[in-house]
Amino acid sequence: MAARAEDEPVPPGHERTGSPEEHVLRFESGLVLGDAAEVALEDYARALLSASRADAIRDASSLAVEGVRVIEAKIPPGPSSRRDVEDFARGLAQDGAGLGLGWS
C-alpha cells in the first residue's frame, strides 16, 4: 500500500496518524455499543478493508464508540468505507441498544 503524502488531502472523517499503515475512521457522533457489538464492528471494519487489525475507539468519559482504528488495510479507506463502517455501527446501536451482534 502506498503511503499517503503529507500534502495530500485527508478524506472527511479520516485522520492522519503519522503511520502509513494506520488509519482512523471517525464517526459523526459517538454510539453506545455493548462488548459483542464492538467486536462485530471491529470484525466488519477489518473484513471490509482487508486489514490485519481494527480497534474501536471509545470516548474516555462517555465510553461511546467514536470511530475505528484500522491497521495495515489492503484496501485504502476512503469516505465511502468510513460511511459503511459508521452505518454498520449505527445499525448495531439501534438493534437491541447496541448489545447484540445484529449481523451474525
Image (tube, rainbow, N blue to C red):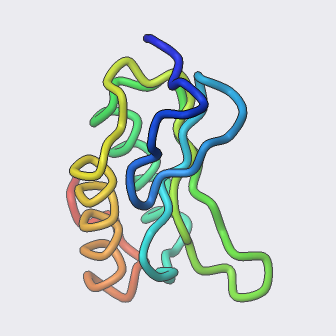
Q: 99 or 68, which lies in front?
A: 68
Residue 5, by quadrant, is top right
Which image quadrant for residue 71? top right
Residue at image point 47% right, 34% down: 8
Q: Is residue 10 above or below residue 83?
A: above
Quadrant of the frame with the N terminus: top left
Coordinates of residue 27 in the picture (x, y in percent): 44, 69
- Residue 20, image x and y in percent? 60, 23
Which residue is drawn at the image coordinates 57% and 56% (left, top)?
Answer: 56
Q: Is residue 93 above or below residue 38?
A: below
Residue in view at x 68 percent, y 40 percent: 17
Number of on-image labels: 0
Residue 53 appears left or right of 63 = left
Residue drawn at x 21%, y 51% is 80
- Residue 26 is left or right of residue 46, and the answer is right
- Find residue 3 and report its horizontal and vertical position in percent: 53, 17
Q: Nearer the viewer, residue 9 or 48?
A: 9
Location of residue 9 (image quadrant): top left
Measured as percent of width and height from the top left, residue 78 is found at 31, 43
- Left or right of 33 in this view: 49: left
The residue closer to the viewer here, 16 or 61, is: 16
- Residue toward you, 87 or 16: 16
Is 3 rendered above or below residue 77?
A: above
Outermost residue to the front: 7
Find the residue positioned furthest to the right.
60
